[in-house]
Image (cartoon, rainbow, N blue to C red):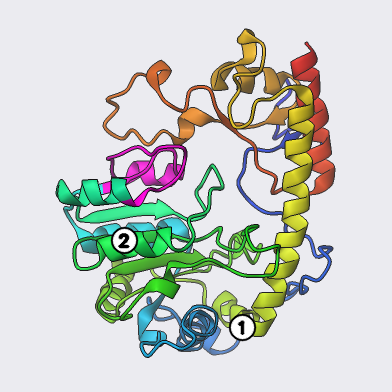
């Protein structure tokens, strides 16, 4: 079999959860083609990030999520980190030993961190959160929108979850996909737990986001953690021995991109474009006989993630098996007992031409 690395242009890679990075999305601002390197950019940067970018992130959250609230974020509530995984690693380092809970399915990187409970209907439920806190869970980690299902938790459910956690558990919210919100007619609205924080320095809510997904710059490795000053100070300190901090020239280049009005326009363009692609993929799949969200409507030979994945490779299309999202660090479950066994994840992040190639290939798989 010919490998993807040999001729990637002949393959449809629907496996990597990364957005297209081209400049041809209508209404989206052009990304920099060159980066100016200042004298400061030649030096080691602060491990918590440069102050102008930290201020820009704080201002963005205040303008979009803290209007009319007395408690506001400042640069001291923001730590710049070299990517989402680095942010999670720093958080894990400062939390130490803790009884942590997360939902299944969720982001594969969490599997290296810990384990606990599964969800119902691919949604986070306040009752389940309350039950687990009562059992002694002191840290809850999840993504919103959910990765890989795309489910969005909005208010009042999100506010209820945060009320349940307040003074009882640290809530870690991975909001990297928050820009991909299709629940408000693609008006540029972003859903964030920052809106429900009462006191930015007292509520134990840590928010992870960055330039990777909603600004479509995954190669920059510029991300941030927003939270109470005490947490952020510790995150900055541990960065000196964990990762050394984030690339300074790219931090400097990111500052101007976070002007709140500019971001709102960007999110509107992002949502309109990616909803079109999502709807295209879903329409094609349903037309082939897929019973969304699983593989149950397909012939038995390709009705589980592993066999479907293998059949797709023969047609030069890449998907991710659902088992990858079964967070099972203790390895207590057999693969075939996994609740994710009959699922795959298809990313609609690539360009529409790649999506069409991928859907054509999957249609050949089904017809076989």
Between 303 and 55, the residue placed more toward the observer is 303
Based on the displayed image, in which of its 4 quarters is residue 74 positioned?
A: bottom left
Picture residue at 50% right of the left edge, 80% below the top = 57
362 within the magenta span = no
Say if residue 205 shows up in the picture: yes
Q: Position of residue 268 (x, y in %)?
A: 72, 69
Say if residue 36 shows up in the picture: no
How many neighbours does mark 1 have within 10 angstroms: few (below 14), some (14-19), or many (20 or more)? some
Image quadrant where one finds the N terminus: top right
Mark 1 lies on a secondary structure that is helix
Task: Give the residues in magenta.
Answer: 101-126
Q: Position of residue 309 (x, y in %)?
A: 62, 23
Q: Is residue 268 above or below residue 48?
A: above
Between 42 and 256, the residue placed more toward the observer is 256
Q: Position of residue 112 (x, y in %)?
A: 34, 43
Residue position marked by numbered label 1 in the rendering: 260
Residue position marked by numbered label 2 in the rendering: 171
Question: What secondary structure predominates along the stretch shown in magenta?
Answer: loop
Picture residue at 33% right of the left edge, 68% below the top = 205
Alpha carbons under labels 2 and 1: distance apart: 25 Å
Picture residue at 55% right of the left edge, 78% below the top = 251
Between 132 and 172, the residue placed more toward the observer is 132
Picture residue at 33% right of the left edge, 33% below the top = 328
Looking at the image, tell me whether mark 2 or mark 1 is earlier in sequence order: 2
Mark 2 lies on a secondary structure that is strand
Between 175 and 121, the residue placed more toward the observer is 121
Left or right position of 135 against 156:
left
107 within the magenta span = yes
């Amino acid at each position: 079999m010919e490998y993807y690395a040999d001729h990637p242009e002949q393959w449809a890679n629907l496996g990597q959860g990364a957005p297209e990075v081209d400049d041809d999305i209508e209404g989206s601002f052009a990304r920099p083609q060159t980066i100016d390197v200042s004298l400061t950019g030649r030096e080691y940067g602060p491990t918590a990030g440069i102050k102008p970018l930290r201020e820009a992130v704080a201002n963005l959250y205040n303008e979009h999520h803290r209007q009319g609230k007395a408690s506001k974020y400042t640069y001291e509530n923001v730590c710049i980190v070299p990517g989402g995984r680095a942010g999670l690693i720093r958080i894990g380092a400062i939390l130490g030993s803790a009884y942590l809970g997360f939902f299944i399915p969720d982001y594969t990187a969490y599997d290296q961190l810990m384990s606990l409970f599964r969800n119902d209907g691919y949604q986070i439920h306040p009752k389940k959160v309350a039950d687990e806190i009562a059992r002694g869970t002191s840290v809850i980690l999840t993504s919103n929108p959910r990765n890989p299902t795309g489910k969005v938790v909005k208010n009042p459910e999100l506010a209820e979850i945060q009320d349940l956690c307040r003074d009882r558990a640290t809530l870690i919210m991975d909001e990297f996909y928050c820009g991909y919100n299709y629940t408000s007619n693609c008006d540029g609205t972003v859903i964030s737990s920052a809106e429900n924080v009462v006191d930015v320095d007292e509520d134990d809510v840590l928010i992870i986001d960055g330039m990777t997904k909603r600004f479509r710059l995954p190669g920059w490795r510029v991300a941030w953690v927003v939270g109470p000053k005490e947490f952020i100070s510790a995150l900055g300190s541990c960065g000196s021995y964990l990762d050394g901090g984030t690339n300074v020239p790219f931090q400097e280049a990111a500052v101007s991109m976070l002007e709140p009005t500019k971001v709102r326009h960007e999110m509107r363009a992002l949502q309109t474009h990616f909803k079109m692609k999502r709807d295209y993929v879903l329409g094609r799949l349903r037309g082939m006989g897929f019973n969304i969200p699983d593989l149950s409507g397909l012939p038995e030979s390709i009705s589980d993630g592993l066999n479907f994945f293998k059949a797709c490779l023969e047609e030069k299309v890449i998907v991710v098996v659902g088992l990858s999202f079964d967070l099972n660090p203790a390895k207590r479950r057999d693969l075939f007992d996994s609740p994710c066994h009959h699922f795959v994840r298809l990313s609609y992040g690539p360009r529409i031409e790649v999506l069409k190639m991928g859907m054509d290939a999957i249609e050949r798989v089904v017809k076989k």
